[in-house]
Image (tube, rainbow, N blue to C red):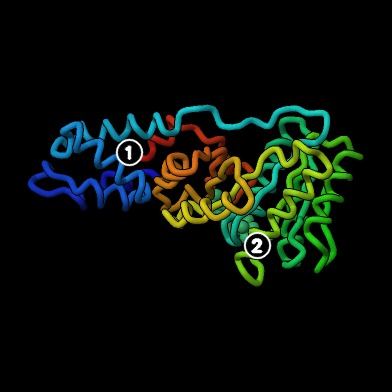
C-alpha cells in the first residue's frame, strides 16, 4: 500500500506543485465518488485547494475521523460465536477463514471451521487441508448439499464440541451473482434458527487490489445479507486501500482485519492510525 500517494500527488500536480487536481487524485486513490466529492468540497470551502501541504494534512485528519472507533471484537458467549464469511471468489475468503482459525486458535479458543460451499469441491478440499494443518475441527457437506444445512449442522457440532468459535466459509461463485447473495442470506437466517444472536459477525472478504469495485461489492452484499464489517486482503501488493475509508464513509462498515500475504500469520487487526500513515507514506 505504501508509496502510491506521493506518486499520485506528482501525477496530478501542476504549476510547480502549487495546484493539485484533488478530485482526480482522490478518485485514483480509490476513495470513491461520494467521499472524493465531500473531501474536495471541504478543501474548497476551507480555502485549501491551492495549498497542497495543508490540504493533504486536512484530508489526513478527515480520514482519521472517518475511521475512528474500535473494530468489533469477538466476545465470549455461552454458545459458539459465529463468524460468517462472504465474498466473491478469488478475494481470499478461504485463506482468510484459515488465518482466522489459526489466530483465534492461538488465543486458546476452540474453533470449528465449516465449508458451506457445496458447489466447488476444490474450495472444500482447500479449507480441509488448512484445517488439518492448523489442527482445527472441520465440517463440510456433500457436493450438491444445501449450504444452509451444512451451516446448521456445523453449528450443532460446534455446540456439541463446546467450541468457542464457528467460522463459516461460503461459496464465492454460483450460476448467477444473485443466487450467491440469496444463498448467503439463507445461511444467515438458518444460523439464526439455532441461535438468535448468530451469526455474530458477517464479514465481507474483499480483494484490496480491485480498488473502488470493492465499494460496489460491499454495497451489494450489505443490501442482500447485512454485513457487520470487512476483511480487506492483498494489501501487501499494489492496493491503494482508499476503499477502506470509502466503505466506512458510505456504508458505515468498519474494516476488521487486513490480509498482508498468503501465510497463516499474514492477517492483522485493522489499525486506523497505521493505515492513515501508510496511505500517505
Ligand atoms: P477465495 O476464492 O476467495 O476463497 O480465495 P482464496 O482464499 O483461494 O485466495 C485466492 C488467492 O489469493 C490465493 O492464491 C491466496 O493465497 C491469495 N491470497 C489470499 N489472501 C492474500 C493476501 O492477503 N495477500 C496475498 N498476497 N495473497 C492473498
Q: Which mark is residue 180?
A: 2
> Residue farthest to the left?
15
- Gap between marks 1 and 2 measured at Cα: 36 Å
| x, y percent for residue 70 | 54, 27
In depth, the one of 276 and 135 nearer the eye is 276
Q: Quadrant of residue 94?
A: bottom right
Q: Which residue is painted at 83% across and 60% down in the image?
A: 141
Question: How many numbered marks, from 0 up?
Answer: 2
Q: Is residue 200 above or below residue 208?
A: above
How many residues crowd mark 1 within 10 Å: few (<14), some (14–19), many (20+)?
A: some
In depth, the one of 185 and 136 nearer the eye is 185
Instruction: Tell me if 251 is positioned left or right of 8 in this view.
Output: right
Q: Which residue is painted at 75% across and 49% down in the image?
A: 189
| x, y percent for residue 10 | 20, 48
| x, y percent for residue 81 | 75, 36
> Residue farthest to the bottom?
175
Q: Quadrant of ligand 1?
A: bottom right
Placement of the C terminus among the 4 image quadrants:
top left
> Residue farthest to the right?
160
Q: Which mark is residue 62?
A: none
In depth, the one of 95 and 50 nearer the eye is 50
Nearest to the eye among marks 1 and 2: give it. 2
Which residue is labeled 1 in the image? 280
Amino acid at each position: 500500500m505504501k508509496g502510491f500517494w506521493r506518486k499520485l500527488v506528482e501525477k496530478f500536480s501542476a504549476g510547480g506543485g502549487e495546484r493539485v487536481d484533488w478530485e482526480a487524485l482522490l478518485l485514483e486513490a480509490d476513495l470513491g465518488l461520494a467521499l472524493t466529492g465531500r473531501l474536495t468540497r471541504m478543501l474548497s470551502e476551507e480555502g485549501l485547494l491551492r495549498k497542497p501541504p495543508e490540504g493533504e494534512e486536512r484530508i489526513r485528519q478527515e480520514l482519521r475521523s472517518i475511521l475512528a472507533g474500535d473494530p468489533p471484537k469477538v466476545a465470549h458467549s455461552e454458545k459458539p460465536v459465529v463468524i460468517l464469511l462472504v465474498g466473491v471468489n478469488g478475494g481470499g475468503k478461504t485463506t482468510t477463514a484459515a488465518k482466522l482459525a489459526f489466530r483465534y486458535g492461538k488465543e486458546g479458543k476452540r474453533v470449528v471451521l465449516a465449508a458451506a460451499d457445496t458447489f466447488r469441491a476444490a474450495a472444500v478440499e482447500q479449507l480441509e487441508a488448512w484445517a488439518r494443518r492448523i489442527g482445527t475441527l472441520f465440517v463440510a457437506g456433500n457436493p450438491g448439499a444445501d449450504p444452509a444445512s451444512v451451516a446448521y449442522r456445523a453449528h450443532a457440532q460446534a455446540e456439541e464440541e463446546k467450541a468457542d468459535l464457528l467460522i463459516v466459509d461460503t461459496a464465492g461463485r454460483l450460476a448467477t451473482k444473485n443466487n450467491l447473495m440469496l444463498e448467503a442470506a439463507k445461511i444467515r437466517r438458518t444460523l439464526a434458527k439455532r441461535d438468535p444472536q448468530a451469526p455474530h459477525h458477517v464479514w465481507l472478504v474483499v480483494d484490496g487490489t480491485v480498488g473502488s469495485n470493492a465499494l460496489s461489492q460491499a454495497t451489494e452484499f450489505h443490501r442482500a445479507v447485512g454485513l457487520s464489517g470487512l476483511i480487506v486482503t492483498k494489501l501487501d501488493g499494489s492496493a491503494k486501500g482508499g476503499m477502506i475509508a470509502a466503505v466506512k464513509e458510505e456504508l458505515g462498515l468498519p474494516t476488521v482485519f487486513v490480509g498482508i500475504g498468503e501465510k497463516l500469520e499474514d492477517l492483522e487487526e485493522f489499525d486506523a492510525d497505521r493505515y492513515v500513515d501508510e496511505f500517505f507514506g
